[in-house]
């Protein structure tokens, strides 16, 4: 036996009659399971790589099995997969909520309201172009943010940081209300306007919608910050 391979020796009962079918794995008795480093454990293990066989002098009906490192158990594999899914959900939540907050801030402070110097026709044309370009992008990121936020809240339950997560869901609700009441109606209506002959009250309607847009923007920023705080202050298990 190579000196580099450290093994533990366990007793294996020889069955009276060999069972038909595939050769069974060698089952290690409690207290003598091999863990690959030569120490005894109190768990049952399956030795999938026997390295030596010899008869036990004190027990003629038994043999001693030299055992190499056991394979990773199904329970451990399931645990690793569940932890990977758990981390993926948290990553998705921070990623999508961060993108949504960035889009909102970029629209408000980067683009802002159409410049007054463009004139009425130019302002309406710019607004219509923005609505057409963003009417798919923002809803997609909103849906992904909402799904991941709810999933994180359900997975973490009442663990540390739950107040941040519940507050984050509240800001998500505020974002939805601000968009349904203020942004969505004016965006749909502006696409029907004739830039050369817009409605007489179009400017007042845009200014009213802008107030709701500001509330929605800060709600998106708060949503990202709260879930980020919940992750940062989460106590390890």
Image (cartoon, helix red, strand yellow):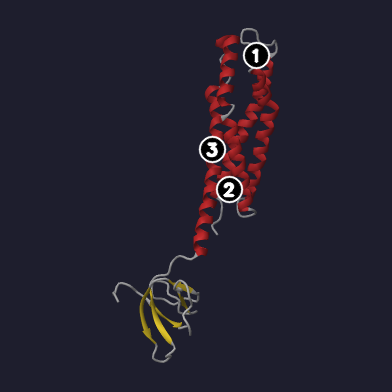
Q: Give the numbered dot on residue 230.
A: 2
Quarter of the figure that contains the C terminus = bottom right
Q: Nearer the viewer, mark 2 or mark 3?
A: 3
- Neighbourhood count class around disc 2 (C-alpha, 10 Å): few under 14, some 14–19, many 20 upward: many
Comparing 85 with 51, the one in front is 51
| Circle 3: element type | helix
Percent of width and height locating residue 187: 64, 22
Circle 1: element type: loop
Question: In front of the other: label 1 or label 2?
Answer: 1
Dot 1 surroundings within 10 Å: few (below 14), some, or many (20 or more)?
some
Q: Quadrant of the N terminus?
A: bottom left
Residue 184 vs residue 67, the one in the foreground: 67
Q: Horizontally, is 185 left or right of 65 in the view?
A: right
Could you tell me which residue is drawn at 66 percent across and 14 percent down?
203
Q: Is residue 164 above or below residue 112?
A: below
Where does the image place residue 46, in percent across and percent down from the top left?
Answer: 46, 72
Do the residues under discs 1 and 3 have CB atoms within 8 angstroms? no
Residue 9, percent from left and from top: 40, 80
Nearest to N terminus: mark 1 or mark 3: 3
Sequence order check, earlier mark of 2 and 3: 3
Quickly name the residue at label 3.
Answer: 98
Residue 190, x across and y down, in percent? 64, 18
Residue 226 sits in quarter: top right
* 164 is higher (above) or lower (below) than 136: below
User: What residue would you read off at disc 1?
Assistant: 193
Q: Secondary structure at mark 2?
A: helix
């Amino acid at each position: 036996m190579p000196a580099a391979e450290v093994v533990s020796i366990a007793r294996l009962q020889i069955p009276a009659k060999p069972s038909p079918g595939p050769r069974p794995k060698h089952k290690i008795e409690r207290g003598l399971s091999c863990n690959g480093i030569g120490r005894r454990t109190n768990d049952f293990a399956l030795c999938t790589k026997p390295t030596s066989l010899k008869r036990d002098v004190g027990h003629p009906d038994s043999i001693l099995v030299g055992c190499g490192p056991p394979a990773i158990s199904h329970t451990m594999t399931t645990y690793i997969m569940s932890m990977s899914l758990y981390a993926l959900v948290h990553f998705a939540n921070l990623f999508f909520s961060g993108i949504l907050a960035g889009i909102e801030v970029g629209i408000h402070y980067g683009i802002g309201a159409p410049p007054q110097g463009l004139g009425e026709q130019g302002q309406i044309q710019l607004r219509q172009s923005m609505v057409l370009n963003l009417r798919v992008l923002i809803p997609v990121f909103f849906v992904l943010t909402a799904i991941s936020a709810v999933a994180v809240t359900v997975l973490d339950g009442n663990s540390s940081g739950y107040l941040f997560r519940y507050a984050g869901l509240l800001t998500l609700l505020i974002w939805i209300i601000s968009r349904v009441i203020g942004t969505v109606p004016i965006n749909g209506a502006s696409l029907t306007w004739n830039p050369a002959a817009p409605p007489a009250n179009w400017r007042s309607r845009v200014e009213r919608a802008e107030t709701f847009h500001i509330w929605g923007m800060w709600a998106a920023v708060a949503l990202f910050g709260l879930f980020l705080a919940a992750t940062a202050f989460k106590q390890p298990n």
